Image (cartoon, rainbow, N blue to C red):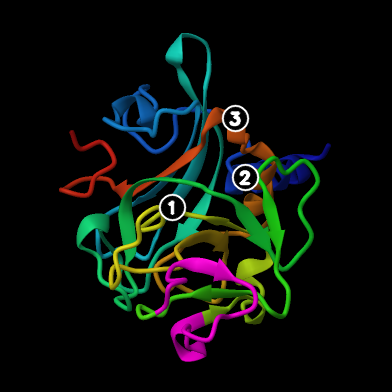
């Protein structure tokens, strides 16, 4: 291969973090090994921004291997909320902020077909698929199909209307198990749109596909969202 072709190929691999490494940190200690909580599984996604005002950062996905060592499997540039990041416990709905914290990944969904090799349960979006964000509804912060009468359309997301963002996505378990009304609904890891998100984390399409093929539910993958330093730092103890 010619030198220019080699350089271009290397750049393409680096853009999606194809080469394993320690990623997102100083020194040789992998980021998850410097975290107080990784969710308890053997797979982890970290979504890290420089500070709470950032709308860009990096998503890295990790495997915990023999001896408890974490290895970066891949990484990609990420987008966060248009108003940056905020501690998950104090987030308010409609603030266009991404909640920090460690969350489960209940299931995947998408407008496009399930990528081959996807291990997570994958729900295909239909014209009747909605994510209810109406604080008055019994279906608050839930997929509904069809939309129930007590869930106002103006307070919800019609999932099929969000292409390319919802070509593929993973539900982030923020405010999910026992929803607190007014804290926020519909927080996902999804495909990039035109810019910052309304509070989700987004990555390029190919990165999202790679994450879906990589994640194994039996290994209990989680996502940890945070900053490099300060009260919302991923490494804060």
Counting residues from the start of the chain, the first of labels 2 and 1 encountered is: 1
Reply above or below: 161 against 212.
Answer: below
Query: Seen in the image, is 170 located left or right of residue 172?
Result: right
Image position, residue 23 (x, y; %): 44, 34
* Quarter of the view holding residue 14: top right
Image position, residue 215 (x, y; %): 61, 38
Q: Tell which tag, 2 or 1, sits nearer the viewer.
A: 1
* Quarter of the view holding residue 89: bottom left
* Quarter of the view holding residue 175: bottom left
Q: Quadrant of the C terminus?
A: top left
Query: Is residue 202 visible from the viewing direction of this image?
Result: no
Q: Dot 2 corresponds to which residue?
A: 211
Range drawn in magenta? 137-156
Q: Residues within 10 Å of mark 2 (few under 14, many from 20)?
A: many
Q: Is residue 143 magenta?
A: yes
**Secondary structure at numbered mark 2:** helix
Q: Tell which tag, 2 or 3, sits nearer the viewer.
A: 3
Query: Seen in the image, is 216 located left or right of residue 9?
Result: left
Counting residues from the start of the chain, the first of labels 3 and 1 encountered is: 1
Q: Is residue 84 magenta?
A: no
Residue at image point 81% right, 46% down: 116
Reply above or below: 57 against 124.
Answer: above
**Secondary structure at numbered mark 1:** loop
Residue at image point 16% right, 48% down: 230
Query: Seen in the image, is 189 located left or right of residue 46?
Result: right
Q: CA distance from mark 3 to mark 1?
A: 17 Å
Reply above or below: 95 against 66.
Answer: below
Q: CA distance from mark 2 to mark 1?
A: 17 Å
Q: Are marks 2 and 1 in contact (CB under 8 Å)?
A: no
Q: Dot 1 corresponds to which residue?
A: 173
């Amino acid at each position: 291969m010619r030198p220019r072709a080699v350089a271009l190929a290397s750049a393409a691999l680096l853009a999606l973090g194809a080469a394993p490494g320690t990623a997102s940190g100083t020194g040789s200690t992998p980021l998850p090994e410097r975290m107080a909580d990784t969710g308890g599984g053997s797979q982890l996604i970290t979504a890290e921004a420089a500070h709470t005002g950032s709308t860009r950062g990096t998503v890295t996905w990790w495997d915990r291997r023999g001896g408890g060592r974490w290895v970066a499997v891949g990484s990609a540039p990420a987008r966060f909320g248009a108003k940056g990041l905020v501690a998950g416990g104090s987030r308010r709905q409609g603030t266009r902020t991404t909640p920090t914290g460690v969350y489960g990944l209940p299931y995947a969904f998408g407008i496009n077909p399930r990528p081959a090799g996807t291990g997570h349960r994958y729900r295909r979006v239909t014209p009747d698929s909605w994510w209810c964000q109406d604080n008055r509804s019994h279906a608050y912060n839930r997929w509904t199909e069809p939309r129930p009468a007590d869930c106002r359309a103006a307070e919800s997301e019609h999932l099929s209307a969000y292409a390319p963002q919802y070509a593929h996505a993973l539900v982030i378990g923020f405010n999910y198990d026992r929803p607190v009304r007014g804290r926020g609904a519909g927080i996902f890891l999804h495909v990039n749109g035109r810019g910052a998100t309304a509070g989700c984390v987004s990555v390029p399409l190919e990165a999202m596909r790679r994450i879906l093929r990589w994640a194994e539910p039996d290994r209990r993958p989680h996502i940890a969202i945070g900053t490099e330093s300060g009260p919302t730092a991923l490494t804060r103890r």
